Structures are given as C-alpha cells and as structure tokens.
Amino acid sequence: MRKVREYIELLQPERGYPDFETASARSAGFLDRVRFNSHIIPVDSAWASDVGDYGWQIPLWNRSAARERPQVYPMPDVAFVTLGEGQGERPRVAQECRDPDFVYFFADFKTAGSDTDAWPARDRVHWSGVADG
C-alpha cells in the first residue's frame, strides 16, 4: 500500500474582512480580503502539529519540502487584497503572499459542526497571544 496524495481543498477560496457582523470595519485595518487562487494545496501530514488539546494545524506550504520536490509542493498562490490609493470609493490592490509557510489550515476537533464561523475563537489561532501594552 502507498499514500497517493495529501492536500487541503479550500471550500471558501476568498474571504472578506472583517469577517464577523459584530466586528467594526476598522478591525481589519487595510485588509479587505484574502484570496486563494490555488484551491487544492498539496501538504504532508508530517508538517502538522497539535494545538493545545483541542486542535490541529498544518502550514499550507513547506519551503524545505518544496526545494526537494518542487513538482509535488509548488508554492500556493495566495493574495492579500488591500485597500489602497486610486480611483473609486474603495480602491483595492492584490499583494502576493511570498511566505505561505506562515499561513495555516486549522481544525478544531473539540467543537461540533463544520461551520467554522461558529467555532470559538482560540488563543494563538485567531490572535497572536501577545499581551497588549
């Protein structure tokens, strides 16, 4: 037996920010949306790690693995769409993500349901864990 393929498939390839109705527009800063132009992203479960006692995470790219096997692990095409100067009410520009190895897929296995918007916010997943001040 052999493993054929491991991948993350994005069911929501574009997400606007702020992404909760209760959040103010200012909370997203200049970020308007994140767009994943690669909808299927090859990964290796060996890159994954547990998050506390409630979740699991995996980076969407591994630079070392990509150097060894670039045909298997191409860099995913991710863009940060930001507000900028220009024509119109809300001009936007897409910025290429050059470090997708710092972008993670996260799964919460303690929360029931697949609606990720209903999952509780978690320290070090939804914010940095760095104290204010």
Image (cartoon, rainbow, N blue to C red):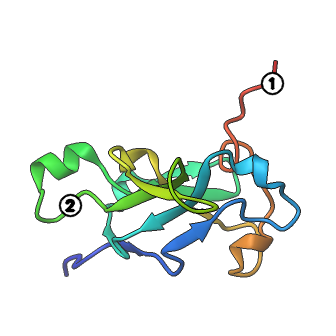
Residue at 13 percent of width and 46 percent of height:
67
Q: Is residue 89 left or right of residue 48?
A: right
Q: Do residues under tags 1 and 2 come within 8 Å of each other at their CB atoms?
A: no
Mark 1 neighbour density, 10 Å: few (under 14) some (14–19) many (20 or more): few
* Residue at the spot of label 2: 74
Secondary structure under the numbered disc 2 in the rendered image:
loop
Question: Looking at the image, which residue sits at the far front?
Answer: 87
Residue 10 % position (x, y): 46, 76
On residue 132, the disc is: 1
Secondary structure under the numbered disc 1 in the rendered image:
loop
Q: Kindly identify the amino acid type of the residue bearing the numbered disc 2.
A: Pro
Pick the front one: 114 or 82: 82
Residue at 54 percent of width and 78 percent of height:
12
Report the number of numbered marks: 2
Q: Quadrant of residue 121?
A: bottom right
Residue 22 % position (x, y): 88, 62
Q: Kindly identify the amino acid type of the residue bearing the numbered disc 1.
A: Asp
- Going from N to C along the chain, the mark reached first, 1 or 2, is 2
Q: Is residue 99 above or below residue 35?
A: above
Quarter of the picture holding the C terminus = top right
